[in-house]
Amino acid sequence: QVQLVESGGGLVQSGGSLRLSCRAPGSIFSLSDMGWYRQAPGNERELVARVFSSGNYNYADSVKGRFTISRDISENTVYLQMNSLKPEDTAVYYCNLNYLYRNYWGQGTQVTVSS
């Protein structure tokens, strides 16, 4: 069983910053694609940012220039630095790990941005 441990959500004012963390099993971390998704009430889960095992990245258009995904292989952790947060960024954020074409999810962490 692959367990992902998330932390870092919370309440922040518009324009503020938060950093999310997701720790994954060390045995597969460097071989996996890692990503952050989010789901707001009434909406489907959507991709926010992803870092591939190759080191390439991609971002949702709505967060480009504001969010940065990174990974620390020594810590088996992927981060999502979120700057210039907007109320529309409010959602539950989920860490995702894709390994050998199987998806694994974290428990989710709430991010709330007040106007």
Image (spheres, rainbow, N blue to C red):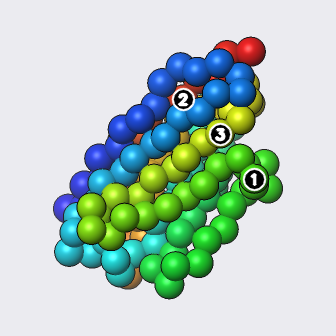
Mark 2 falls on what kind of element?
strand
Residue 77 % position (x, y): 34, 58
Residue 65: tell me if it is visible.
yes
Q: Are marks 1 and 2 in contact (CB under 8 Å)?
A: no
- Closer to the camera, 30 or 39? 30
Residue occupying the point 71% across, 35% down: 84
Residue occupying the point 53% across, 35% down: 18
Earlier in the chain: of badge 3 and badge 2, it is 3
Earlier in the chain: of badge 3 and badge 1, it is 1
- Where is residue 57, by image quadrant? bottom right
Residue 38 % position (x, y): 58, 43
Q: In the image, is residue 2 above or below residue 94?
A: below
Q: Which residue is mark 3?
A: 83
Q: Are marks 3 and 2 in contact (CB under 8 Å)?
A: no
Q: Which residue is mark 2?
A: 111
Query: Label 2 sits on what residue type?
Result: Val
Camera-side mark, 3 or 2: 3
Residue 9 % position (x, y): 46, 31
Query: Label 3 sits on what residue type?
Result: Asn
Query: Label 1 sits on what residue type?
Result: Gly
Q: In the image, is residue 14 above or below residue 97?
A: above
- Are there few (<14), some (14-19), or many (20+) residues within 10 Å of tag 3? some
- Where is residue 8, by image quadrant? top left
Disc 3 to disc 1, C-alpha distance: 9 Å
